[in-house]
Image (tube, rainbow, N blue to C red):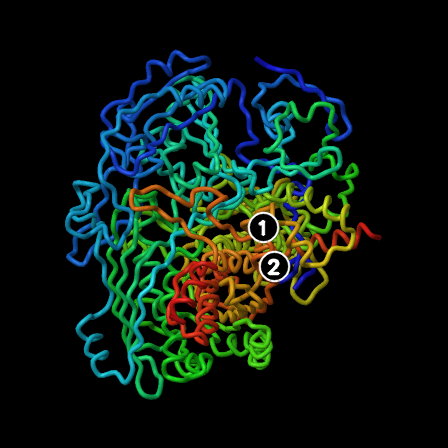
Amino acid sequence: MTVSVSLTVNGEAVSADVEPRTLLVQMLREQLGLTGTHVGCDTSQCGACVVHVDGESVKACTLLAVQAEGAEVKTIEGVADGDTLHPMQQAFHENHGLQCGFCTPGMIMSALDLVKNNPDPSERDIREWLEGNLCRCTGYHNIVKSIDAGARAMRG
Amino acid sequence: MTEQGIGAAVARREDRRFVTGQGHYTDDINRRGQTHAYFVRSPHAHATLNGVNTDAARAMPGVRGIFVGEDMADVGPLICGWAITDVNGEPHKAPPHPALAVGKVNYVGDAVAVVIADTLEQAKDAGAAVEVDYGLLDAVADPARSMAAGQPQIHEEAPDNLCYEWALGDKAAIDAVFDGAAHVTSLEFSNNRLVPNAMEPRACVAEYDDGTGEYTLFIASQNPHVHRLVMSAFHGLAPEHKLRVVAPDVGGGFGSKIFIYAEEVVATWASARIGRPIKWTAERSESFIADAHGRDHVTKAELALDSGGKFLAMRVETIANMGAYLSTFSSAVPSYLYGTLLAGQYTTGGIYCNVKTVFTNTAPVDAYRGAGRPEAAYVVERLVETAANETGRDPAELRRINFVPGDAFPYETPVIMQYDCGDFAGSMDQALDLAGYGGFQARKAESKANGKLRGVGFSSYIEACGVAPSAAVGSLGAGVGLWESASIRFNPTGNVQLLTGCHTHGQGHETAYAQIVADKLGVPYDQVDVIHGDTAKTPFGMGTYGSRSAAVGGSAIVKAADKIIEKGRKIAAHALEASEDDIEFTGGNFTVKGTDKAMNIAEVAFTAYVPHNYPEGLEPGLEESAFYDPLNFSFPAGTHICEVEIDPETGSVAIDKYAAVDDFGVVINPLIVEGQVHGGIGQGIGQAVLEHAVYDSAGQLISGSYMDYTMPRADDVPNYDVGFNGVPSPLNPLGVKGCGEAGAIAAPAAVMNAVHDALRDVGVGHIEMPATPLRVWQAIQDAAA
């Protein structure tokens, strides 16, 4: 049995037939081909799958696709402005805030929600906000630095 | 240094695809007609396999095939590629390791059957319907107990579960030194078992093309050619020329993606059987039980000192857990990558090391970031720090009087290594400054005023990287050579493709290697592309691990560049009507000495491909390959200093400050190298205070998810102060040493020395890794009781 789900992803109206047990992250990756959203665990701990649903950061592995019916979803593929990187993406690049890149989409999506809620976060704010995002490569030093720089750039 | 050459902090070119979600990891790959594999795994640590009934499962929707161990009789078992010779001159015990279990399962996670179906959900549903008849056996998970009488025997071939006993040094002579020593420091501790936990789980997509007889395997691998070689030569899946292995973007490895595992062997084999591509991606719970783990030593270590504080001798006995089977390089880790590093940075007179490796009913244990060297550094640096405390000396000063002095290189250690160069005291002095060591007592007093305990800890580690000279490792039992390859291909329009046998999975080779080529050949950095990770494209290479990609892979690039220059010189001499001896090459230009006659390397490349005016007898084209076999290991070393603050009420350990000064020789890209140090320190802090793969007595992994296994998070770690004190290695053309593992090697000892320093004030003598709040709090209570 499948059910039809319709939602907006990165500004485009999309729909797909999914099994009821399909997670939002599976639908994004497998039905819509948006493979920038990653799956790094099966307990909603790692944050590699963070996307925005109606403007809030959400772990796309904790939501069934059917629960996103009618929602506005933004994934990492929808963050840059054409060829121009978003200031947060640019900050990760300039500050070497990524190594293998697997956690990076989730980190950036999470960071964008932090800055929306807290435009001028302290180092402690950033570190505590990242509780739900695991990185095994960077020791977090340059991720924190990147988010600080990205937030500054976004403040203008 | 040019703007984007060696030494420049170039921001990485690979970043763009990762920050925009355009990376191509294995699980992102989908092939037409693709099916999905699900592995049925043993829930028991030790059991006979009395039968597997797949009838019901086979009838379920979408199922294409179900296979068990007996179906794969034509496939060779998984192998260990390093044969250790034991103390009696006998080879280590390497019991057969079938890809799918036959007759018996030996750890929780051992694969029993594979179900292949059109969708992953169908494969899982059918997997749940596979009935396995297990005959439960007693299990042993604790390495210290596995050799004892009455313990379950895991493999017939290995009586008392002993894989090998290995030793280095003259025990009688060392014992005599201990007998006459003014002071002996003695410690017993474990080196906690870890799960590598690269953020991208292992994954593969295997397919067979019946038209060409070729297999293609896309896999999250650190070494695609090694995968191809082993799968051809040992598993017999396909001849090498009929097996293409592609390692696309790989989301971290840390050793765990070096090895040849059951899943890729089964998927590749089965893809021809069912005539469809097969995808398998590990779930994280599966990674916890089925990836090779790291560390897991139990050690007794002693250091003998004279009355002046000089280290006379060291005696180390270790039991190392190999898990249920020998993984690909596992046997080398607690022997040649461990015992040979026990001299540390010191002039210790003699060393005896005895290692017993044992089988247990746990997942196989193999190389994890540092691989043997973190365990060695922990032994040495915990001993040294404890000795300083016991003899009333400042830990920095005790180290200083024992360091190998700068004029003693090349220095032969008592444990078969020859250090090429170093400045151990210089690095420590720089680290003392960076750490603000002079202000420690004031900070300690402030912590005390706030009811907290503050401690400082040192770790003056050394490691052996650039693994390694092929003949040397061959004499020690390695089944492979450990050289590296590079091929530099100029295109007619002057841009360059560099093909390397190394593989980048976070290390930034696409950037750093382009910097080397730009620097050596004077080609603009953005005109150089780096190609790696595909056996159909690149020359055979050994891959990336052991901090070898700069020292060995980078040296191969330099060698290939030298050949390009040599040929270019001939082409330029002919075109410029000069003698070859009069041609100089600098900054990308071939110039006739003492004149303004010059030809850029791009023009030389064009001439090579359009050879109208060309030296007689010279081959057209400008493409050169090189294979570089290192002359020695390289020896990165440094001093890391950690400060912790402990809340005695809760036992929680806060890592307050962390300073690292490392000698990596020449640094190609400081931005990348600092990042490597940060990441290693993060993992080392994880080992020291957070992470622990715990098996219970029945062999169940009880910290088998991110709910239970404590990964370091952003608020567990501080900012790191990182400095360099590079002494260029004289033994490779770049002068590099390797930086990938330093942090993970140094940090556990630095953190734990700090924890012990802090807890000494409340009478705590010894505490094991990880120093969790519970352990610390309990130790404080016990000391007070």
Q: Earlier in the sequence, mark 1 or mark 2?
A: 1
Q: Quadrant of residue B102?
A: top left
* Viewer-side residue, B381 vs B204: B381
> How many C-alpha atoms fall within 10 Å of the one at disc 2: few (<14), some, or many (≥20)?
many
The reply to whether the C-beta atoms of the residues labelled 1 and 2 are less than 8 Å apart is yes
Q: Please, what secondary structure does the residue beneath circle 1 have?
A: loop
Chain bearing mark 2? B
Whether B205 is drawn above or below B437: the answer is above
Q: Quadrant of residue B227?
A: top left
* Residue appearing at x 42%, y 80% in the figure: B405
* Viewer-side residue, B467 vs B400: B400
Q: Is residue B251 left or right of residue B288?
A: right
Whether B104 is drawn above or below B625: the answer is above
Residue B184: percent from left, percent from top: 29, 78
Please name the residue that numbered disc 1 is placed on. Answer: B508
Q: Please, what secondary structure does the residue beneath circle 2 have?
A: loop
Please name the residue that numbered disc 2 is placed on. Answer: B669
* Viewer-side residue, A132 vs B761: B761
* Residue appearing at x 54%, y 39% in the figure: A40
* Residue appearing at x 76%, y 50% in the figure: A118
Q: Is residue B428 left or right of residue B379?
A: right
Amino acid tagged 2: Asn
Residue B244: percent from left, percent from top: 45, 32
| Same-chain check, marks 1 and 2 | yes
Residue B299: percent from left, percent from top: 30, 62
> How many C-alpha atoms fall within 10 Å of the one at disc 1: few (<14), some, or many (≥20)?
many
Q: Quadrant of residue B785?
A: bottom left
Residue A86: percent from left, percent from top: 76, 44
Amino acid tagged 1: Gly
CA gap, disc 1 and disc 2: 9 Å
| One can see residue A96 in this view | no
